[in-house]
Image (tube, rainbow, N blue to C red):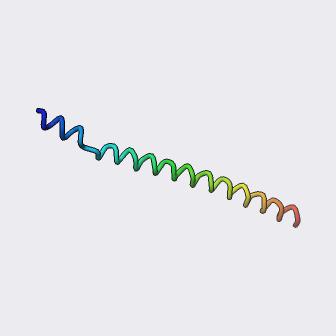
Amino acid sequence: MKNLLVRFLRNESGATAIEYGLIAGLIAVAIITAVRTVGTDVDAAFDAIAAAL
């Protein structure tokens, strides 16, 4: 029973999965922010072109 508990406490695969999940979440937030910023800039450019026409 003691060996089972020691193996369970030394197992880090769950912690690794959580770390990868957090990294993926942060990357997703960065991508969403970048896409929104670029989208707003492109929208403003198309509005300026439409006004000029």
Residue 2 versus residue 36 in the image, above or below: above
Q: Residue at x 57, y 55 (%)?
A: 31
**Figure quadrant of the C terminus:** bottom right
- Looking at the picture, does residue 29 appear above or below residue 44? above
Image point (31%, 43%), residue name: 14
Locate residue 45, reporting x and y percent: 78, 62
Towards the viewer: 42 or 6: 6
Q: Residue furthest right?
A: 52
- Quadrant showing the N terminus: top left
Residue 47, x across and y down, in percent: 81, 59
Q: Quadrant of residue 6?
A: top left
- Outermost residue toward the top in this view: 1
**How many numbered circles does the render carry?**
0
* Residue drawn where x is 87% and y is 61% of the image: 51
Front position in the image: 47 or 2: 2
Q: Give the answer, above or below, for where 5 lies relative to 33.
A: above
At a point 28% along the width and 45% down the height, the residue shown is 12
Residue 30 locus on image (x, y percent)? 57, 52
Residue placed most toward the observer, 5 or 35: 5
Q: Is residue 40 left or right of residue 25?
A: right
Residue 25 locus on image (x, y percent): 48, 48
Q: Is residue 13 left or right of residue 41?
A: left
